[in-house]
Image: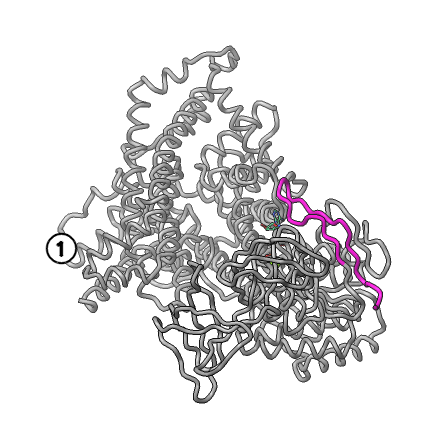
Amino acid sequence: MLLISPTLVFTLLMLAVPLIMVLALSFWTQSYLTLDRSFSLENYKTAWTEPMYQYLMARSLKISIFVTALTVLLAYPVAYFISFHVTPKRKAMWIFLITIPFWTSYLMRIFLWKVILGYNGVVNGSLMGLGLIEQPLSFILYNQNAVVLTLAHSWVPFAILPIFVALERVDRSLIEVAEDLGDNWLRRFFRVTLPLSMPGVIAATIIVFIPTIGDYVTPRLVGGPNGLMISNMIELQFKKANNAPLGAALAISAMAIVTCVTLVFVWMNRKFMRGPK
Amino acid sequence: MMRGKGYFFKWYVALFLVFLYAPAILLPVFAFNDSSIVSFPLKGFTTKWFEVLQSTEALHVAVRNSLMIAVTTAIFSTIFGVLAARASTRFAFPARRSIMGFIMLPMVLPEIIIGVSLLVVIIQLGFELSLFTIILGHILICTPFCIAILSSAFMNLDRSLEEASIDLGQTRWNTFWMVLFPLVMPGIVASLLIAFTISLDEFIIAFFLSGTEPTLPVYIWGQLRFPQKLPSLMALGTLLLVLSISLLVLADYFRRRSLKKTGIENSGGFL
Amino acid sequence: MTKPIIQLSGVDKFYGDFQALSQIDLDIRTGEFFSLLGPSGCGKTTLLRSIAGFETPSAGSLHIDGKSMDGVPANKRPTNMVFQSYAIFPHMSVAENVAYGLKARRLPKAEIQERVSEAIFMVGLQGFDNRASHALSGGQRQRVALARALVLKPRVLLLDEPLSALDKKMREQMQSELRRLQRAVGITFVLVTHDQEEALTMSDRIAVIFDGKIAQVATPQMLYGMPSSRRVGNFIGMMNFLEAKILGTSGETVEVDVQSLGTLTLPLSQAPGGVEGCQSIGIRPEMLTILAEGQTAEREIEAVVSEVFYYGDMTYYDVTLPQKDAPVTVTMRNTAGRKVLAAGDTARVGWSPVSLLLLQ
Ligand SMILES: Nc1ncnc2c1ncn2[C@@H]1O[C@H](COP(=O)(O)OP(=O)(O)OP(=O)(O)O)[C@@H](O)[C@H]1O
Ligand SMILES: [Mg+2]
């Protein structure tokens, strides 16, 4: 107990206290330069009813859901490949290989997608070079597609890892039993492998979903005006617009939504863990 | 049937790796490209962008700030990590799961939330934004990673090793230094390196909490707006990539050594 | 009788509400090979760790070599332990492991070196001195653990299931080696095991523990031949039980009515746990004989063979006695010319009143 206390006290001071203060702040109101410290739900009213915020929130949620789905779909076959088609000795190396790009400078990595997807970018350049298109494609940068793609790229290693771990835990003899009982590969996959690896899929979903909804840099760099997300608005309120209480209310609201969605996933996870036995 | 499936996976994974590595590969390509515009077609080979870096004073300041922050963060989050990992793997205490869950929370919380909430506290308490405030934020987010690494190092320790040492007549203090410490040392080094790497690259929290002194990512963010600065940023990114990968390989080497020392077969990578 | 080196009296150990040890009274004599035997979870390890100083008894007293161990930490006790997992320090070589305790005692270098090679020689690991300890087989680790503890010349060596991680062959080899070592060094060994065969072959005396209580302390012969209760008899080897009713005692004898066997008069010495409360008669399978044609025995009873288990050197028969539902097991050595019966055959079972035990 004594050992844990320094870490716990630090986390309490640096995480719990600030979160509580943000919560408090969200009930106060800003009038020009002074902060009105009387309790008010004004900020929440603005955050939940003003169309601009509603719209941003919905868009953030939508992008996050797309990113999560895309990431998990991209990740699963890779995790499956490493778990089932790579010799055990090589598995660690493959996992390492998957995580390396993640350690490229975060900002540069995102910025480079701008270079790849841009008007004179790599994709357009190659496609035109191959004669597949005549005009550069413009629908691939500065919109929500670009945000989804870039975020998926950022988070896919984090989705592969838990799915891989879950697949490694699947008892191989269970799959053999299914084969022995007459299931072909596809049926075996859907009836045995996938359900047994579901906890990993759900963990991946949570790991990707939570941080993406709060991502700031990606929408700013590749999103264009229509690709901005809620965190850009939170930053705006805290900095330029100088309305920290509204920013706090937006942050709390976003967190509440994330928590709700996550809880649903956790609940689903529980159901899967218990299994239909 | 088997072959067809194998081919599908090989092709899929190959394409996936291209997607995954695309930015990382383009970085050095543009860093050595003799053109002030970052786009295709390539123009020729040059190292002048690296020379530009050498003569940019503001960059040097940012690098110094970032190094200072990263070193401090690495040390403190590893200390916190050692304490928490040891406590959680060796002792039972009330509400252990919830306490550990809470401490690990920053790992999944969106960074913007952490950034914003620390900003609120600092402003409300009337503190100045400074490198110190960034350090606090970084320790907060790095500690969970350190705990994750150190927990596995501590967990692999057989509890009877400690008891054997005491049984053979050694004191508790010496047991720590002669048995526990050597066995978890590689884990500690790995934890320091990971925390250092994370802190060095962290942007959001630094962006919210930096006052007048920028960190390296904050400096890069400022420069991204100027097209003429881009090629030298590519050079900078290349250097950082090489640095990160070296540190990671080093960290992984130490982690493996730790596993080897405790005689456990290596499995899996980081995280 | 040699004086006890370890004396436990009235030792209790509670984990929260759970009582792992209750009222343990035990004297272990100097120089003997003593075993703690009992089923899994009965508290053997807890008792051993209390002696070593890793657990503090909730009540009672513990004396080692006549000194109270109250408040004496594990590193100050004249005992050393061989852990079930061996607990070999993975970052040290064989020699460094063995030298660990000597270094803690700050002995001169030359002496350490001499004693280490002596100990390594004693356990048969010469030539392995500089081997990294994670590159050792299970049997070799076991030897390092032994050398590491024995090199300190403790008054008592505590061993917690030291052989359970070894395969059968290695285990048998180490059993005789442990016995040899114990005789050679003359140190008191206290061995924890759940393997009755291991306890019987190695020990001078054995304490049988059930549910945190000592059921019986005796030599292997006494334990096997004169178990003090039905439970001990059943735990050590095989034993058949027949219901029995005590009709009365007179002087040195007791009269009992035994299911299937009728009314018998037995000497009191055949009730090792006392006559009071006895409800069964126990008899070892090898004390019963399937009589060949023409063979006779002191007493005989007709039975039907219900099941035959052929083991090569032995045959185990389950036979049903006239007034008993559950079958009784009879083991027979397969000698030349002896006919092996089949299920359904009738058999004459020979027995003798002297091999009956009256048990609770
Ligand atoms: N630290 C503890 N906290 C709570 N209960 C414990 C603890 N240690 C042991 N016990 C309980 O005490 C009982 C005796 O444990 P012990 O380890 O002594 O058994 P054992 O006889 O050595 O069994 P085994 O043969 O399985 O090793 C068990 O029921 C166990 O669950
Ligand atoms: Mg035990």
Per the picture, the main secondary structure of the magenta-coloured stretch is strand
Q: Is residue B181 visible?
A: no
**Secondary structure at numbered mark 1:** loop
Q: Pick the residue in front: A202 or A126.
A: A202
Tell me, yes or no, whether the highlighted magenta stretch contains residue C14. Answer: yes
Please provide percent x and percent y for residue B88. 58, 46
Mark 1 lies within 8 Å of ligand 1 (Cβ measured): no
Relative to A125, say whether C143 is above or below: below
User: Which residue in the protein does label 1 denote?
Assistant: A132
Q: Which residues are magenta?
A: C1-26
Q: Residue at x 57, y 33 (%)?
A: A14
Residue A7, quarter of the rendered image: top right
For the N terminus of chain B, the quadrant is bottom left
> Callout 1: few (<14), some (14-19), or many (20+) C-alpha neighbours within 10 Å?
few
Judge from the rendering whether residue A19 lies leftward or rightward of residue B30; answer left or right.
Answer: right
Q: Pick the residue in front: A36 or B215.
A: A36
The amino acid marked with disc number 1 is: Leu
Residue A84, quarter of the rendered image: bottom left
Quadrant containing ligand 2: bottom right
Relative to C330, say whether B61 is above or below: above
Residue C225, quarter of the rendered image: bottom right
| Colour theme | one colour
Q: Is residue A95 visible?
A: yes
Q: Pick the residue in front: A147 or C92.
A: C92
